[in-house]
Image: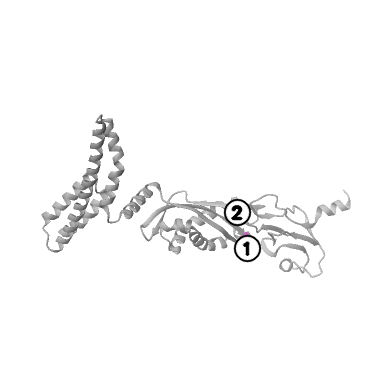
């Protein structure tokens, strides 16, 4: 082996990282048994930073550019090694490169519904998912808190931790945003901002910065969605229950007419079926109005000293409406509870 080959093997003149793969946050330069030549060149590309570490102690940090390594450009390392200003010998030190570009399309989401406080419903169990980006913000902190002396540290190594931090702060984000659940779907950008602000300090503690977080979907479990749909429907009906019942009866007319036709009644049967449907709509509308009027009358009479037997009679009427499918179980229970309070 010639003298030139020996020098090339022992001393390093150029230190650089070409980032051959995606998703790498930190990478340690492979020195093996070689030393850094005094006056060597450090190449730090755009979207990179380089950190010198001496015997476990963090030293000088370099940003993008081409740097000549001397005592003047390595003040912290010079102090740690107690070098004289005129030293000319090769030296040993660990050099770590960090990628500062955005790591895109990282996914987050709830594997199970989580319970959140809500202005309208008190508490709801929701599912949510989206994506986000993260970048290196503080290489010194990331080295001491996360990556350490590993040869490489990737986004995949942090994926579970970062997703857990997002889900942990999901409840805080909803509370800080002040947005009711029913409005979250229409305010996903505001919700995403609130979640970013809530989780940012936890990312900063790792030397990272969260960017570009999106909320792509917020939904209820299927069983709660059905209840919400029913409540929305009742809200749309409002006080005009009679028209709602007539509309429901009208929707059932084709079914009644078809059933009459199958029974062999012909035109007369069809007409009878249609007539029965119209009559059913009128009867149901009248019954619901009578039931609501009876309940209202019972409530008003209670303040004037209504008798217990009259309250029980009203409850029986409501129970009959429920049995005929005119009132739902929830409507019947609510009105029953209201009437029973008058007996106390």
Q: Position of residue 285 (x, y in %)?
A: 23, 49
Element type at mark 2: strand
Q: Residue at x 75, y 67 (%)?
A: 73
Of the numbered discs in the image, which one, if any, rests on residue 274?
none
Whether residue 317 sits left or right of residue 17 in the image: it is: left
Is residue 250 shown left or right of residue 286? Answer: right
Label 2, label 1: how far apart the Cα atoms are = 18 Å
Return the mark for residue 104: 2
Q: Which residues are magenta?
A: 138-142
For label 1, the SS is: loop
Mark 2, mark 1: which one is toward the viewer?
A: 2
Q: Nearer the viewer, residue 170 or 84?
A: 170
Left or right: where 6 falls relative to 281:
right
Give yes or no for contact between labels 2 and 1 (Cβ–Cβ under 8 Å): no
- The vertical placement of 218 against 74, above or below, is above
Decide whether the magenta segment is chiefly helix, strand or loop. helix
Question: Where is residue 70 drawn, in percent x and y?
Answer: 78, 66
Name the quadrant of the C terminus. Answer: bottom left
Mark on residue 138?
A: 1
């Amino acid at each position: 082996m010639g003298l030139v080959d020996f020098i090339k093997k022992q001393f390093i003149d150029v230190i650089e990282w070409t980032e051959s793969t995606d998703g790498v946050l930190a990478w340690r330069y492979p020195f093996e048994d070689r030393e850094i030549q005094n006056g060597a060149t450090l190449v730090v590309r755009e979207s990179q930073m380089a950190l010198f570490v001496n015997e476990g102690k963090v030293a000088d940090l370099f940003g993008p550019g081409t740097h000549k390594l001397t005592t003047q450009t390595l003040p912290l390392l010079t102090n740690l090694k107690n070098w004289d200003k005129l030293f000319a010998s090769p030296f040993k030190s660990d050099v770590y490169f960090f990628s500062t570009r955005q790591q895109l399309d990282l996914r987050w989401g709830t594997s199970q519904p989580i319970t959140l406080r809500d202005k309208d419903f008190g508490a709801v169990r929701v599912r949510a998912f989206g994506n986000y980006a993260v970048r290196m913000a503080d290489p010194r902190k990331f080295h001491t808190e996360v990556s350490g002396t590993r040869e490489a540290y990737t986004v995949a190594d942090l994926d579970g931790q970062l997703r857990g931090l997002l889900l942990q702060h999901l409840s805080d984000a909803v509370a800080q945003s002040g947005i009711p659940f029913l409005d979250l779907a229409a305010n996903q950008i505001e919700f995403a901002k609130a979640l970013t602000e809530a989780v940012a300090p936890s990312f900063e503690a790792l030397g990272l910065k969260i960017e570009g977080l999106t909320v792509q979907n917020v939904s209820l479990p299927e069983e709660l969605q059905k209840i919400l749909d029913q409540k929305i429907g009742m809200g749309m009906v409002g006080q005009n229950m009679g028209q709602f019942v007539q509309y429901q009866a009208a929707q059932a007319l084709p079914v009644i007419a078809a059933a009459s036709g199958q029974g062999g009644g012909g035109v007369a049967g069809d007409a009878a079926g249609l007539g029965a449907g119209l009559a059913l709509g009128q009867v149901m509308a009248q019954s619901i109005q009578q039931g609501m009027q009876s309940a209202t009358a019972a409530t008003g009479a209670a303040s004037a000293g209504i008798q217990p037997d009259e309250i029980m009679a009203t409850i029986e009427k409501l129970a009959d409406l429920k049995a005929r499918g005119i009132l739902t179980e929830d409507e019947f229970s609510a009105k029953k509870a209201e009437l029973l309070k008058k007996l106390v």
